[in-house]
Image (cartoon, coloured by chain):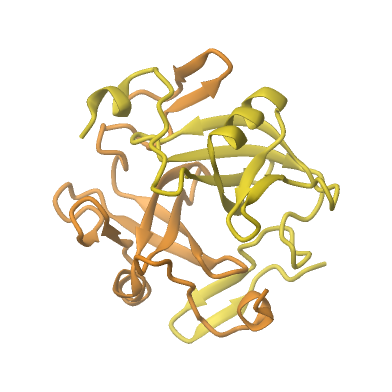
Chain colours: A yellow, B orange
Amino acid sequence: MDDMRDRGLTLNPKYDRDGLITAVVTDDASGDVLMVAHMNAQALQLTIDTGLAHFWSRSRQALWKKGETSGHMLQVRDLRIDCDQDAVWVKAVPAGPTCHTGARSCFFRRVGAEGLSSVDAAG
Amino acid sequence: MDDMRDRGLTLNPKYDRDGLITAVVTDDASGDVLMVAHMNAQALQLTIDTGLAHFWSRSRQALWKKGETSGHMLQVRDLRIDCDQDAVWVKAVPAGPTCHTGARSCFFRRVGAEGLSSVDAAG
């Protein structure tokens, strides 16, 4: 365990072999988890500098300013990093549905013993 | 995009090349993000079956029942999966501090333009 990284006050993200950390976005108002994505160093820096959530799209292999095409940007209210600095928590105000399906949150299905059930369908 | 996986009601996790999905745990009472970890198929199944959060420890390369040694288990109140089924959201009641540093949440440091600052120190 890296004690400086785990407890110190120096930003030192532990990027994985693809140069990414995990980013969890919650709704600043409801506390709901809206999405999980990834950031590279550039996306993290742009998020800090602009106050708008930026990610690295693994499918498109490109920098991804959330909402650039949909208009559904994520305005950052708080940005936290976890103990081993391989994940950030973005508390944000969403400008619209966060999920590409049209749902408010990407987590619109509940996992139960009998499979999935809808919780918050696209609306 | 896999429409069945994205919108259907069949559990079909998209495990990465290491056989893992991302797991985000929030505090059922406060909504705070407590930790981010990973699950393999066995950990996900045990979480569903037992109602206690299980993960796959990448550092130890072993199944990890959260709280097995510390007693700080995470009792699952709700389990959700995201659109592309590569991440789950666990809403849980924590039996104690979730972070190995003793902090309530692993996300006890804020990221700002001037580096990190403590938000919720171990207590």
Whole-percent x and y of residue A32? 61, 51
Whether A104 is drawn above or below A19: the answer is: below
Quarter holding the C terminus of chain B is top left
Above or below, B33 against B107 in this view is below
Instruction: Name which quarter of the figure residue A49 lies in.
Output: top right
Q: Residue at x 37, y 58 (%)?
A: B38
Taking the spot 34% from the left edge, 65% from the top edge, the residue there is B18
Is A88 displayed left or right of B47 in the figure? right
- For this orientation, the residue located farthest to the left is B69
- Answer with left or right where residue A96 lies relative to residue B27: right
Q: Nearer the viewer, residue B16 or A95?
A: B16
Q: Is residue A27 visible?
A: no
Look at the image and tell me in which quarter the N terminus of chain B lies: bottom right
Tell me: residue B11, above or below residue B83.
below
Q: Using residue B61 as the reference point, say whether residue A44 is left or right of it.
A: right
Residue A78 image offset from top left, x and y in percent: 60, 29
Q: How many marks?
A: 0
Instruction: Name the residue furthest top.
Output: B114
Question: Which residue is more in the foreground, A89 or B69?
Answer: A89
**Do we see residue B110 in this rendering?**
yes
Figure quadrant of residue B104: top left
Q: Residue at (70%, 67%) from the top-left corner?
A: A120
A51 above or below B33? Answer: above
Residue at (58% x, 65% y) in the render:
B82
Residue A108: where, in percent of width, then height?
64, 67
Give how far across and how far down residue B6 sits, in percent: 65, 75
Quarter of the view holding residue A60: bottom right
